[in-house]
C-alpha cells in the first residue's frame, strides 16, 4: 500500500482547532423562538396594547434555537440575572445533509 492509498484509506477526520481559528471571529446571529402564530393582516391591524397572540407552543415546551436562520438546537428559557433572560440548550438538532 502506498502512502497515498494509506491516506485515502483513513477515516475522514474533522478540522483541527488550528484550522478552525479562521472562523472564530465571524459573527453569527443567534435567535431563540418561543413560538409562532399565523394570522391575516386584518387581524394583525386590530391588535392593540395588551393584546395576546396565541403561539403554537405549550407552556414549558422547548424553544427553538437558530443560528443564522438554521435550527441547531432546542432549549429552555432561564433567568440570567435579575432582569435578563437566556436560553440553555437541552438538545442539539442534527442537520440533514444533502448529497
Image (cartoon, rainbow, N blue to C red):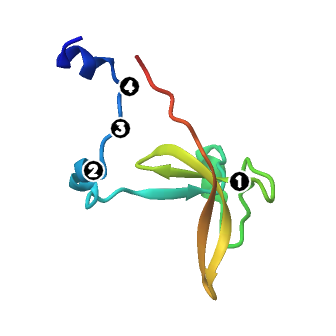
Q: Which image quarter is the N terminus in?
A: top left
Query: Which residue, given by chain and number where applicable, does mark 4 sit on?
Result: 11
Q: Residue furthest top?
A: 1
Q: Which percent across, then down, holds residue 97?
A: 45, 25
Q: Are marks 2 and 4 in contact (CB under 8 Å)?
A: no
Residue in view at x 43 percent, y 21 percent: 98
Q: Which percent across, then down, holds residue 68?
A: 40, 49
Q: Which percent across, then down, holds residue 96?
A: 51, 28
Which mark sits nearer the N-terminus, 1 or 4? 4
Asked which quadrant contains residue 80, the reply is bottom right
- The residues tagged by marks 2 and 4 sit, at their Cα atoms, a distance apart of 19 Å
Q: Residues within 10 Å of mark 1 (few under 14, many from 20)?
A: many
Residue in view at x 50 percent, y 50 percent: 66
SS at mark 3?
loop
SS at mark 4?
loop
The residue lying toward the viewer, choosing from 50 and 70, is 70
Query: Which residue, given by chain and number where applicable, does mark 3 sit on?
Result: 14
Query: Which residue, given by chain and number where applicable, does mark 2 sit on?
Result: 20
Asked which quadrant contains residue 3, the reply is top left
Q: Residue furthest right?
A: 59
Q: Are marks 1 and 4 in contact (CB under 8 Å)?
A: no
Is 6 placed left or right of 84 in the picture? left
Which mark sits nearer the N-terminus, 2 or 3? 3
- Above-or-below relation of 9 to 97: above
In the rendered structure, find residue 41 and report the number of the disc placed on it. Answer: none
Which mark sits nearer the N-terminus, 3 or 1? 3
Which of label 1 and label 4 is nearer to you?
4
Query: Which residue, given by chain and number where applicable, does mark 1 sit on?
Result: 62
Amino acid at each position: 500500500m502506498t502512502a497515498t492509498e494509506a491516506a485515502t484509506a483513513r477515516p475522514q477526520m474533522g478540522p483541527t482547532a488550528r484550522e478552525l481559528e479562521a472562523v472564530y471571529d465571524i459573527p453569527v446571529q443567534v435567535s431563540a423562538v418561543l413560538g409562532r402564530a399565523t394570522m391575516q393582516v386584518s387581524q394583525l391591524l386590530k391588535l392593540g396594547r395588551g393584546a395576546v397572540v396565541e403561539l403554537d407552543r405549550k407552556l414549558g415546551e422547548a424553544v427553538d434555537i437558530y443560528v443564522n436562520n438554521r435550527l441547531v438546537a432546542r432549549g429552555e428559557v432561564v433567568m440570567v440575572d435579575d432582569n435578563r433572560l437566556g436560553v440553555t440548550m437541552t438538545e442539539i438538532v442534527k442537520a440533514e445533509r444533502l448529497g
